[in-house]
Amino acid sequence: SQQGEEDPQALSIQEGENATMNCSYKTSINNLQWYRQNSGRGLVHLILIRSNEREKHSGRLRVTLDTSKKSSSLLITASRAADTASYFCATIGNYQLIWGAGTKLIIKP
Amino acid sequence: GAGVSQSPSNKVTEKGKDVELRCDPISGHTALYWYRQSLGQGLEFLIYFQGNSAPDKSGLPSDRFSAERTGGSVSTLTIQRTQQEDSAVYLCASSLGTGNQPQHFGDGTRLSIL
């Protein structure tokens, strides 16, 4: 069963704007990971945030984690057409990653 | 190449046939995962291999599904007597270990059952 739930399910913004996606989960975690998927094929790991971290940056990506609310957000700043993809959060409790259904992000030129 | 390799990339077969999907993980990665993804959905965990330990098969949807990992490297996912509901993209991932390690994915096999 899915643990993570991303929202919104779909997001369409203009190139250059910021995109924010949220993820909520149900049980305690060791870490939370965000992945990107282009065209329904393989996923690419973006960023991992550990349960004792509150914020993490990687280039144009900023991830926050609020363990009290069991939620995380992924912010993509200054979006580009190449950012068009589906974004998934995944949490790990024991050893398995448990995935949400994803947010489909469309960047309009 | 240095990434996870899956073959075939596409497979179309008739209902009732058996299919074999192959995954070649990144060299040195001890953990290997199989997932299934239906159109527009998230990933559904199928099976997990870690080193020489017994695999976690808890995600396999029926006994028609099985997987092997020979020599701790290449893995094969076999689906017997395929059904139309087996149509999906089957993704393989590997990682250095478990826990705080990111997973590296292949491009998947798109399976279509006619």
Image (cartoon, coloured by chain):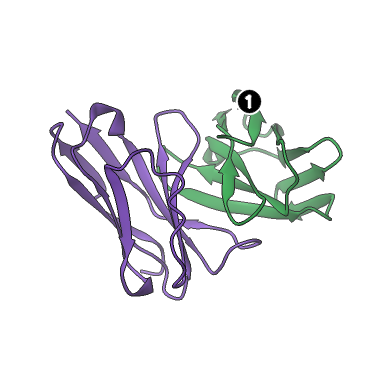
Chain colours: A green, B purple
Q: Locate the C terminus of chain B by quadrant.
A: top left
Count neighbours of disc 1 (C-alpha within 10 A) and say few if under 14, some if 14 to 19, many if 20 or more.
some
Give the residue type at disc 1.
Ile
Q: Provide residue A19's location: percent of width, then percent of height.
A: 69, 33
- Nearer to me, A20 or A49: A49
B27 versus A51 height, above or below:
below
Q: Residue at x 40, y 29 (%)?
A: B39
Circle 1 sits on which residue? A13
- Nearer to me, B42 or A34: B42
Which image quadrant is residue A65 in?
Answer: top right
Q: Is residue A23 visible?
A: yes
Q: Provide residue A49's location: percent of width, then percent of height.
A: 74, 53
Position of A25 with respect to A36 (left or right) is right
Say what secondary structure mark 1 lies in: strand
Q: Residue at x 48, y 39 (%)?
A: B43
Q: Locate the N terminus of chain B by quadrant.
A: bottom left
